[in-house]
Amino acid sequence: MIEKVATLVRELPPSGIRRFFDLVAETPGVISLGVGEPDFVTPWAGREACIWGLEKGKTHYTSNHGLLELREAISRDVEANLGVSYDPRREIMVTVGVSEALDIALRALLNPGEEVIIPEPSYVSYQPCTLLAGGRPVPVATRWEDGFRLTPAALEQALTPSTKAVLLCYPNNPTGTTLSRQDLEGIAEIARARDLIVIADEIYHHLTYGRQHFSIAALPGMKERTILLNGFSKAYAMTGWRLGYACGHPDLINAMVKIHQYTMLCAPITAQLAALEVLKSCRGEMEAMVREYDRRRRLVVAGLREAGLECHEPEGAFYVFPSIRSTGLTSEQFATELLREQKVAVVPGSAFGAAGEGCIRISYAYSLAQLQEALKRIRMFVQSRMAG
Ligand code: PLP
């Protein structure tokens, strides 16, 4: 039946992460530092709001845009956190996770063959979603020496007359790097001069350490050319609820809603009710989770350095992206041999594009006890390779 599958889909490269997790699933007793998912449970008030909603019979479709009350709460939250004001009626839509928001943003923007600049290493969905939307992903390598920041010079070099958009992710999955106001000013200047749209995936924006997140949408002239993507999965430990949102120019949001109304109709009402409640009353719990990630982050960075792996200090998200070059192994070899010998799962940097080679991604969304044990095993593994 494979010949019945659309060529575009048949030719889509398999996810490097998925392939690796198939291997993990076959290995018993593994400590996995592989998954980018909070180990916390959604704050109780959010779960309770969902249960209450069901008790009261709130089981119907919502507006295609999402519950107005939720959009109003999102608008207040975004303004308080990012200093950008969005009209909840025209400039915000609720989506099935940032995943859907990303998909429909790309489909709403791209004519066949139009290009999207994707700084690499990058989140694994960006390139496939661009291809599925009929566009052409243009990976731009970011470098270890620049702390994996996209430089204006690298961006400029990748532009062609077909460039439509730049897809930014900060704080970044997989590197943990975030972009400062100054970094973003250089990118924004090019976006304005070359009339580009910026898709800003800021799903990790609450998870920053020792610095305040700054959004590119807050720069002069950037709100109207930025589609800001955000969601509840990471900050509020709500991955399974599948809820996100997009903010942007009414024309762009309208175009996205046009697709969404035919494909999703609306995001699940259960998740919308929970999200509304966490925005109202769970800020303290969210901040407590962020403090815990920060504690783990410091432990992991120190442990990796002690093990002999060079490591940038991650500024956000819950990932560390250390270099494994000192071991002489490729990232795939490192991850496979570490799994086989020490039963610790990490993700090879190459799963995030060629620019990720030479590094591995470690998620620290795991308990301190798991992290401590995993670090001990990583140290033994690295030492065995250095000695060899
Ligand atoms: N964007 C980034 C950068 C991610 O890391 C993830 C999940 O790992 C997503 C989007 C997907 O988020 P959601 O659960 O809201 O679909």
Image (tube, helix red, strand yellow):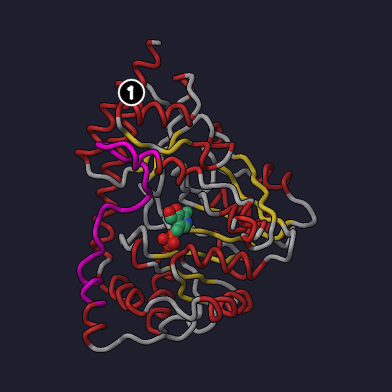
Pinpoint residue 276: horizontal percent, then vertical percent: 33, 76
| Residue 258 figure quarter | bottom right
Task: Determine the quadrant in which ligand 1 lies.
Answer: bottom left
Residue 18 placement (x, y as % from top left)? 45, 46
Viewport quadrant of the N terminus: bottom right
**Residue 48 lies within the magenta run:** yes
Q: What residue is at 36 percent from the left and 76 percent from the top? A: 272
Q: Is residue 321 left or right of residue 54?
A: right
Queried on whether the Cβ of the residue with tag 1 lies below 8 angstroms from ligand 1, the answer reads no
Q: Nearer the viewer, residue 175 or 36?
A: 36
Q: Residues within 10 Å of mark 1 (few under 14, many from 20)?
A: some
On the image, which quarter does residue 146 sit in?
A: top right
Q: From the viewer's perspective, is residue 286 above or below residue 354? A: below
Question: Mark 1 highlights which residue?
Answer: 307
Image quadrant assignment for residue 361: top left
Between 67 and 198, the one lying in front of the other is 67
Q: Return the x and y of residue 82 as percentages of the image width and height.
A: 45, 64
Q: Residue at x 58, y 76 (%)?
A: 259
Amino acid on which disc 1 is placed = Ala
**Residue farthest right in this picture:** 161
**For residue 248, side relative to residue 72 (left or right):** right
Q: Residue at x 34, y 33 (%)?
A: 301
Answer left or right for 44 relative to 359: left
Magenta residues (range)? 23-50
